Image: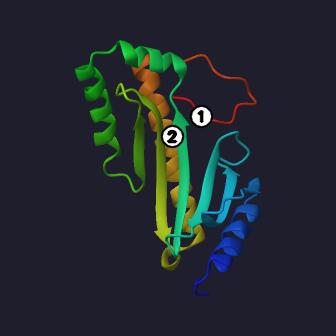
Amino acid sequence: MEITTPAQAKELIKNWLVENHHSVVEVKDENVNFHFEIDYPLGSLKRQRVLQPKDYPGLIVLLNGVAIANEHLEQLKTLAEEQRDKFYSEIRKDLLFLDNSYDMNLDEAGIVKQVQFSYEFYYDGLTKTKLYEGLLVNHRTLLYIVTKFNDKFGVPSMPSQTDTVGNA
């Protein structure tokens, strides 16, 4: 079946996610035709978003991200700008050839506050395999960011179990 409308894409994606036992929450958002928040990996507290922006007909976007732990933020502030830039450059080089995109959100002092990543494809590429490839590459990118920061600065104190936002 050829997918040509947001309604068809929404139904197909939601069915695949439910079939695979994901928790699927529909998010109200006036800028998209549909927006799901799901648990990925399955049954975890980690979340990804699946959406179809109104301004980009036929585009499916898978979003994920990680907030930098406060302990890591404090340690980043102690680094010289050159050291910080070298660390960020390592991350950029490592992520360069992945199939997803990323954005390191820096504050006015050049301290990364969070890293967001997205995997995009159009209706003509919409398959269950493509959906799960995107979710997996986003999850692996999250794990990479967390590991990179933990390797550099140590493992931070973990938030309570009810916190669903990842921290690096």
Asked whether 57 or 144 is in front, the reply is: 57
* Residue at disc 2, secondary structure: helix
* Residue at disc 1, secondary structure: loop
Residue 121 spot, x, y in % from top left: 47, 68
Asked whether 36 or 41 is in front, the reply is: 36
The residue under label 2 is 142
Q: Visible in this render: residue 44?
A: yes
Q: Is residue 30 left or right of residue 88?
A: right
Number of numbered discs visible in the structure rendering: 2
Bin the neighbour count of mark 1 within 10 Å (Cα to Cα): few under 14, some 14-19, many 20 and up.
many
Amino acid type, callout 1: Gly
Question: Considering only order in the chain, which callout, 1 or 2, is on the residue closer to the N terminus?
Answer: 2
Asked whether 128 or 9 is in front, the reply is: 9
Asked whether 110 or 119 is in front, the reply is: 110
Q: Is residue 57 left or right of residue 40?
A: left
Amino acid type, callout 2: Leu
Q: Marks 2 and 1, how far apart in space?
A: 8 Å
Label ID, residue 166: 1
Outermost residue toward the bottom in this view: 1
Q: Residue at x 25, y 27 (%)?
A: 86
Q: Judge whether 148 appears above or below 81 on screen.
A: below
Circles 2 and 1: CB atoms closer than 8 Å = yes
